[in-house]
Amino acid sequence: MSPRWRLLDTGKRPAFENMALDRTLLESCQAGAPNTLRFLRFEPSALIGFHQSASQELDLDYCREQGIAVSRRITGGGALYCDQGQIGWELYVNRRTFATADMLAIAREVCGMVVAGLQSLGVDAAFRPRNDIEVQGRKIGGTGGAFDGDALLYQGTVLIDFDVERMLRVLRIPQEKLSDKAIASARERITTLKTVLGTAPAVDVLQAALVRGFADGFGVSFEDGALSADEWRLLDLYKEEMGKDEWVFETDRPQLEMASASALRKTSGGLVRVMLKVDTARERLKQAFITGDFFINPRRAVVDLEAALRDVAVEDINGIVAAFFAERRIEMLMLTPADIIAVMHDALGSLPCKGDERIRV
């Protein structure tokens, strides 16, 4: 008989309750609770990573105006916008469940199970390193994980339906950058089950497909479960703490440390446009969007390059871009890696850093 794991569906909850449940279940896993798969959904929420600053990452005024709750996760990673159009899934397992501690290898294995579940619904899903799930080059889900002692929390989302423009407003994209082209570019990078299938699948149908993927992948069966008495006690304790502003803004830093920059350059291969989000105090590129009228094959290479440039030291950009093209077979017509580096330098060169100094590139 296959091992039996616990299955929890905690439904739609406020952001702080979902974060408190994360903390509760991870601590419970450390204490020896059974391996658990949890499904969760959100009321409209903006979530920052554990080490992030809400003021830097989010448009807090817009969140307040729109009734979007703000919370801080117990795990790292970037800021997210979540609402009823997404379903979240989380694994709480003993670290011995995997034969490795290499998070990329774990991501590949777990994402493969999610991919299998989506494929059973007729979705042409695939794993995109480092930790995304895509359909024909467009992101449909993100994932991430963290070890804590002998426990591993690995979590992700699947987009059922999604408001891209609202996400951009929440994630502190300056108003002047929210052009029709910027919104269209973001939409080109994201897709949803509603778009792929023509209609949004019922939540229970999607969850059943994901359960099958995880059951087959781990060689286990799932049994509907509930929180234990100890877990309810912990949940009440952590809801009290994580529902307060002190938790959300504990890591807050001034907005001025995060900046956006853009540049446009005409090259022999066509126009190249970049928009960058940069932590100027720490000289780290947080995110890059690359668009234009150039030719590149495969088309997904741009998306993969953006992923490779996520949260890296500015001084490493040249080497990352050069290595990216050296390690892959990518066809470009008259466009060169040096052109892409140059337009990124154009954007970075406009940003101040540490007083009147400029960011070193």
Image (tube, rainbow, N blue to C red):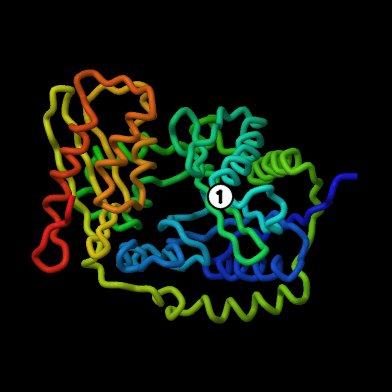
Residue 181, picture quadrant: top left
Residue 268, picture quadrant: top left
Residue 172, picture quadrant: bottom left
Identify the image quadrant of the N terminus. Answer: top right
- Which residue sits at x=45%, y=57%? 77
Is 282 located above or below residue 236 in the figure? above
Residue at the extreme left of the image, as rendered: 356
State the residue in front, 335 or 319.
Answer: 319
Is 349 located above or below residue 151 in the figure? above
Residue 194's x, y, as percent?
52, 36
Number of marks in the image?
1
Residue 132's x, y, as percent?
49, 42
Q: Secondary structure at mark 1?
A: helix
- Which residue sits at x=14%, y=56%? 351
Is 234 located above or below residue 138 in the figure? below
Q: Is residue 21 left or right of residue 342?
A: right
Q: Is residue 2 left or right of residue 6?
A: right
Residue at the extreme right of the image, as rendered: 1
Q: Residues within 10 Å of mark 1 (few under 14, many from 20)?
A: some
Residue under label 1:
103
Residue 323's x, y, as percent?
33, 35
- Which residue sits at x=60%, y=36%? 115
- Which residue sits at x=53%, y=70%? 16
Of the residues shown, which amino acid type is indicated by label 1? Answer: Met
Residue 116's x, y, as percent?
65, 34
